[in-house]
Amino acid sequence: MSALLLVIILVPLVGAAVCGALVRAGAGPKGDTTAKTVGFVVSLVELVLVAVVWAMFVPAAPTRFQGELSVAWIPAFGTRFALGIDGIALVMIALLAVLVPIVIAYTSFTRSSEASAATGRGGTGRFPDGRGAGGFVALMLSLQGILVALFAATDVFLFYVLFEVMLVPMYFIIGRFGGARRQYAAVKFFLYSFLGGLLMLGSIIGIYVASGTRLGQASFDWTTLQHLAAQLPLSTQIPLFLGFFAAFAIKAPLVPLHTWLPDAGAEAPIGGGVILVGVLDKVGVFGFLRYCLPLFPLASQSLAPLALVLSVIGVIYGALLAAMQTDMKRFVSYTSIAHFGFIGLGIFAFSQQALAGSSLYMVNHGISTAMLFLVVGMLAARGGSSRIADYGGVGRIAPVLSGLFLVAGLTTLSLPGTNSFVSEFLVLLGAWPREPVYTVIATVGMIFAALYVLWVFQRTMTRPLRGEAVLGGGPGAASAAALGGVSDGGLRDMLEDDASARARARFGDLTGREIGVLAPLVLLIFLLGFFPQPVLDIVNPAVSATMSEVGVADPVGPNGVAR
């Protein structure tokens, strides 16, 4: 498997180089079109290869990592290009492999891709100033290759390098292809994440020095450093833990280190937002599981109350801010902050069920957020705006779009039968025995989620026709405006029918290609809602190993009853 693991890193990187060369060599749209097609094919090949890795993975294997590969990188510092995957890394790589071809297909082959980012007050489209999607596809594939390597890294210094390098393609995705305030959002995203990385670097240097002192041989190897944890006193673990924690709390993000996300999510192109919030932000919670807990178990236990407080604040704060948003892309970003709070609660509650729920939540949130972002993008591509107030009665003129918006909303609020419900329920069930107060507070966030999701759906989809994005100008808008002063029922019906017909002709429902882009996500939402066990079987051994490394007794017994 080690060779195949290296291949799934190289395939998207080589594909990115090829797409970039095609864009530079092509004459205008021709080179751009070829690059988009090649990028889509490469992403499908990557998906197949990751499926093969999934099939080869053995959950019951005696070792923590499978497919291990280690090559000397910088011998003077003892750094190695070391790779290996556990179940948590594998499901994140699989999530990325599913989302990238969907994003490329959406960006390259749907009606939504024709929108200009310069249109609308929110800068909601794809590629401003006539720039094509070929460069976007190249950046997306390069980001995929970097993220696969990051999730598979078993050398701490290699992880740090990839943690910083992954910022570069996303910076250009936001800064080049984003909305009206894209440069501000891109710089803010980069500076926040880069600062967090520097704090983590300080802790990496500290643990490297500590390994040399305690073991006689300094090392960046994850397994070696995990064994070192038993020898480090709490006074040493706490400052080292805080460097890692700060970097991951910024990336996740946890409140109050979240302020870069709403700006980046709102200004990123829709495809960039899907990967930013769906996968790249998960590097933070992945870091909690892979580095904070196993490498600093005593500090993790000591500072868990801090993490829990920040998590539940995020659940409530994110929900309240989501309900106050006027822009749909910022709305999606704030809902994600609330969901990251649930994941943090599951991680620092220290129970098998809660940790498994958080690991599953990482996958399910990526799917749900992708669905919501893409539907918002398809809506905004038709109306030229992402402002909630610019829409009303869309369900009357685009029923398929409205129905899929509802599906995206229901999985966001964790309706039973959807994928998010299973992971959220596991988190709350596992957190209750040890942290009942935080669990109750987080449960209130579920009520708020239902309120803000249904509020946005009602305003945009179910009200009478309204809003410039829906009605446009001309006779259709005049007919709709006249409704308010009409008391005669028959005349009112005639005006409503006229406004609906004109709006339907201008606005249009989803095309077959757009439905095809969303279909895999809809399938996964309900498939994982009813059959989550295949994913849980993959992550549970890694979760059990993490619990053992932290050294905390599981408060939930094997029969699901609190001890």
Image: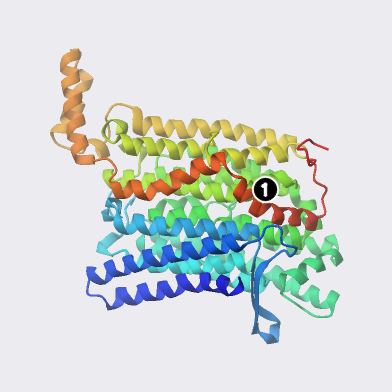
Image quarter (top left, top right, bottom left or bottom right) of the C terminus:
top right
Residue 550, placed above or below residue 69: above
Residue 131 position within the rendered picture, expressed as x and y whole percent measured from the top left: 28, 65
Q: Quadrant of residue 528?
A: top right
Q: Which colour style is shown? A: rainbow
Q: Residue at x 58, y 67 (%)?
A: 150
How far from the left and from the top, in percent, is residue 14?
A: 44, 75
Q: Nearer the viewer, residue 187 or 203?
A: 203
Q: Residues within 10 Å of mark 1 (few under 14, many from 20)?
A: many
Q: Quadrant location of residue 174?
A: bottom left
The residue drawn where x is 74% and y is 56% is: 546
Find residue 440 and report its horizontal and vertical position in percent: 68, 33
Residue 73 at x, y percent in the picture: 63, 83
Q: Residue at x 53, y 46 (%)?
A: 336
Of helix, strand and loop, which one carries label 1? helix
Res 363 seen here: yes
The N terminus lies in which quarter of the figure?
bottom right
**Residue farthest bottom in this picture:** 76
In this rendering, position of residue 127 left or right of residue 276: left
Q: What residue lies at 47% left-to-right and 66% top-to-bottom?
A: 143
Placement of 200 over or under 442, stated as above or below: below
Amino acid tagged 1:
Ala
248 shown above or below 204? above
Q: Residue furthest left?
A: 475
Q: Is residue 310 visible?
A: no
Left or right: where 253 falls relative to 299: left
Determine which residue is flagged by label 1.
Answer: 356
Examine the image and state in which quarter residue 282 appears: bottom right
User: Viewed as shown, does residue 248 lie left or right of 504?
Assistant: right
Furthest residue in direction top, as rendered: 488
